[in-house]
């Protein structure tokens, strides 16, 4: 009979159960494997921990602990495949679960437990490979010792060690106790690629069947005995201060237990979430006008234009752009506008916290376990070893669940009431308190020589800073790297390039959003490249390839989508094709869009998207294709529909009724193509986003001759442009 151990007991016992422990020092990269040591309990019926990343049960089941959040991107499956290959397991015997939040589980590159930047597999590949290989070598040594034969005569395969000369075999489960007596190899030999069973093959997602059956626990599914539910009434305007509220009215709502001021608002604690929300409405809170009461869509547009006239900081300077533009045969200037957009995850921000005098337990759908731990230590004044964090499944993240505000609120409320509290933002709160992808304004001037080659590029961008709030150490000489990502490091060889950055100071919080600066900057860059190609009288594909002679991988993905998409061949009547390319997060991606436009209604219909990605080595092709599809759908939605609206000093958008997203009936045919090579592993979840919007805008121009330079590409903009063109 299996002696099961639930996650909470596992954490409390700090891996003390039995068998083999292998510490992995993550202070450097690749990891250094420390000597194994025995644990106190050698009960042979319990699970063993060959290292910090694995547990092996006597029945041969291996559980892989993953330090990255699973948001549907397939990281858990991909990393389990890496371990399974190096440990040499059968896939049916592999299980996964979220790792504890502890120092040994920090991302070796980030130095924290964080899921973002498409780093799940590429940052952890070496660590998981070595952990699996080290455990395999120790198990081989244990079997060789048992049989009194040289370890070199033993072979690990499919969860067992075999001695081919005698035909003897022992499963991993039976070998763990003996394996604990052997030192962990400091640099275990890794299986060569040609011996992989799983890596490079499409494997079924380990979480797929449970999700279909509703088994996984998401943040909103958490239930703790005796817990209360809470909400916080906050001001609608940025920087507003509380003037008054009706506490008695809120307390009269059935189910409301307690009302009190906390952090930047008024907490209502109740028996149910619905009662808490009703209590907030009954407060009738009054606030000051805020720090920028006149902030709205029109004033925001005006401020961006005013900032465009200001002198900015030089972010990049190659050659002599000023002189090159003066000598150019043809010059052109265009301006592009990108709005603020929300993360709009289907699961709003939430956290359940249980703060006690001597300990704290947290259940949270988070991308930043270290961030949650830090805020928990600050709010509770408890040391890290007294805090347990359970990373639940995430119902969408996209960078938004890097933020830890909801955890801070849940902790503060639980500490005040002395009970576990489930804290959920309403959809309105989720929109109004989001840290958005910042809006931006771009002015680009380009120059062509007599042969129609692009010889000069001057680019000025006005945008709010992201890193100044989240990672200020990365801001160098006043330049926020996300503000110019995709501009100063564009894919093309440009002999003369000048990039100027003007920081837009606003109370609107900006944060990480899928592909961050690349998602908006690539729209401006790839749209302008297309414009210059048409001015030069050249095919947009050939124009790009001419500037990518020193960048064969970028050229490769463009050629792939052109070939698979039928570029240059006759399209259906009224259908236009557009392309775009971008390298980011370690991968090259190109997208080709096929669209048609109803001139009367202004509706843009995307019929087909063809994507090609070169991410270097691929672990699970099926996950890569799924990410191509998901990223493309999200990017189309943002390109055609999404924007946050502002009014009276705050966010006017309050629900999906005024923040439309793409419907299933609008999803086009999406084709994904993977180019593999032996280069380092690149990311997948984010790189597929940036080329989508410019590919669509370029396709609209090909279909209609209308150049749209402002996102989203809405029907009213098409109609307005059609009137101007006619």
Image (cartoon, rainbow, N blue to C red):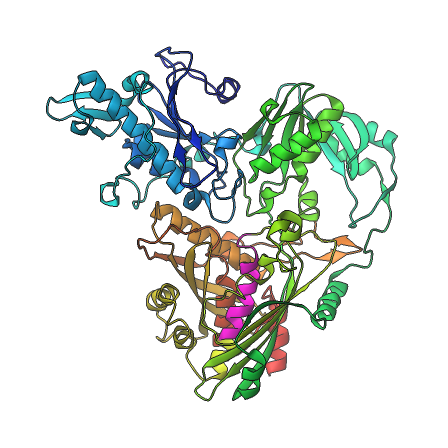
Q: Nearer the viewer, residue 540 or 9?
A: 9
Magenta residue check for 465: no
Residue 676, image x, y percentages:
32, 55
* Left or right: 704, with 651 as reference point: left
Quadrant that contains the C terminus:
bottom right
Q: Judge whether 576 appears above or below 589 on screen.
A: below
* Left or right: 465, with 22 as reference point: right
Residue 643, image x, y percentages:
64, 58
Q: Nearer the viewer, residue 62 or 29?
A: 29
Q: Nearer the viewer, residue 176 or 538?
A: 176
x 62%, y 41%: residue: 348
Q: Judge whether 316 appears above or below 681 on screen.
A: below
Q: Judge whether 167 appears above or below 121 on screen.
A: above
Quarter residue 28 falls in = top left
x 39%, y 65%: residue: 554
Quadrant that contains the N terminus:
top left
* Left or right: 696, with 408 as reference point: left
The segment highlighted magenta reads: 514-529
Q: Judge whether 96 appears above or below 543 on screen.
A: above
Residue 57, image x, y percentages:
35, 20
Q: Main secondary structure of the magenta part?
A: helix
């Amino acid at each position: 009979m299996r002696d099961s151990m639930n996650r909470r007991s596992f954490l409390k016992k700090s891996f003390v159960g039995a068998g083999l422990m292998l510490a992995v020092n993550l202070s450097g990269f690749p990891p250094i494997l420390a000597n194994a040591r025995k644990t106190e309990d050698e009960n042979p019926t319990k699970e063993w921990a060959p290292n910090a990343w694995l547990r092996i049960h006597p029945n041969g089941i291996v559980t892989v602990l993953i330090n990255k959040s699973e948001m549907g991107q397939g990281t858990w499956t991909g990393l389990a495949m890496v371990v399974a290959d190096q440990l040499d397991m059968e896939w049916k015997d592999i299980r996964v679960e979220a790792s504890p939040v502890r120092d040994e589980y920090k991302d070796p590159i980030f130095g924290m437990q964080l899921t973002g930047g498409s780093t799940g597999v590429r940052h952890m590949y070496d660590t998981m490979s070595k952990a699996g290989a080290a455990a395999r070598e120790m198990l081989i040594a244990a079997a060789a010792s048992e049989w009194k034969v040289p370890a070199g005569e033993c072979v690990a395969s499919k969860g067992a060690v075999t001695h081919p000369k005698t035909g003897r075999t022992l499963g991993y489960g039976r070998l763990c106790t003996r394996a604990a007596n052997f030192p962990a190899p400091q640099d275990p030999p890794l299986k060569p690629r040609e011996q992989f069973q799983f890596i490079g093959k499409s494997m079924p997602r380990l979480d797929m069947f449970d999700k279909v059956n509703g088994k996984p626990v998401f943040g909103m599914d958490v239930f703790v005995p005796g817990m209360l539910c809470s909400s916080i009434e906050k001001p609608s305007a940025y920087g507003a201060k509380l003037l008054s509220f009706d506490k008695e009215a809120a307390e009269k709502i059935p189910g409301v237990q307690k009302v009190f001021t906390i952090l930047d608002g008024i907490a209502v604690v109740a028996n149910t979430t619905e009662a808490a929300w009703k209590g907030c409405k009954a407060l009738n809170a009054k606030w000051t006008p805020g720090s920028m009461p006149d902030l709205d869509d029109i004033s925001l547009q005006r401020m961006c234009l005013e900032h465009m006239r200001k002198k900015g900081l030089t972010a990049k300077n190659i050659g002599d752009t000023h002189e090159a533009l003066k000598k150019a045969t043809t010059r052109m200037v265009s301006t592009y506008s990108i709005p603020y957009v929300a993360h709009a995850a289907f699961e709003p921000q939430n956290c359940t916290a249980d703060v006690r005098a001597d300990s704290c337990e947290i259940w949270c759908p988070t991308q930043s376990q270290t961030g949650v731990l830090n805020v928990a230590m600050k709010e509770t004044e408890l040391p890290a070893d007294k805090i347990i964090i359970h990373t639940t499944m995430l119902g969408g993240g996209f960078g938004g669940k890097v933020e830890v505000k909801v955890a801070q609120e849940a902790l503060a409320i639980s500490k005040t009431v002395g009970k576990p509290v489930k804290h959920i933002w309403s959809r309105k709160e989720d929109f109004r308190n989001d840290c958005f992808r910042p809006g931006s304004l771009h002015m680009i001037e380009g120059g062509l020589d007599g042969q129609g080659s692009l010889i000069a590029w001057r680019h000025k961008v006005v945008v709010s800073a992201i890193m100044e709030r989240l990672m200020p150490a990365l801001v160098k000489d006043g330049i926020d790297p996300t503000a110019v990502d995709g501009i100063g490091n564009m894919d093309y060889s440009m002999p003369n390039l000048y990039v100027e950055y003007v920081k837009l100071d606003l109370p609107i919080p900006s944060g990480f959003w899928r592909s961050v600066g690349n998602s908006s900057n690539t729209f401006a860059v790839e749209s302008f490249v297309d414009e210059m190609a048409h001015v030069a009288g050249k095919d947009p594909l050939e124009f790009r390839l001419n500037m990518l002679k020193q960048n064969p991988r970028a050229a490769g993905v463009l050629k792939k989508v052109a070939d698979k998409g039928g570029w240059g061949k006759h399209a259906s009547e009224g259908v236009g094709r557009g392309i775009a390319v971008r390298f980011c997060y370690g991968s090259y991606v190109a997208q080709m869009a096929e669209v048609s436009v109803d001139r009367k209604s202004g509706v843009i219909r995307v019929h087909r998207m063809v994507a090609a990605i070169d991410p270097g080595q691929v672990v699970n092709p099926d996950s890569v294709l799924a990410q191509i599809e998901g990223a493309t759908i999200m990017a189309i939605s943002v390109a055609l529909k999404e924007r946050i609206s502002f009014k009276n000093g705050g966010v006017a958008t309050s629900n999906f009724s005024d923040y439309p997203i793409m419907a299933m009936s609008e999803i086009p045919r999406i084709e994904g193509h993977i180019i593999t090579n032996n280069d380092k592993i690149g990311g997948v979840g984010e790189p597929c986003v940036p080329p989508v919007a410019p590919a669509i805008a370029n396709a609209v121009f090909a279909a209609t001759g209308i150049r749209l330079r402002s996102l989203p590409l809405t029907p009213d903009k098409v109609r307005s442009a059609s009137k101007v063109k006619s």
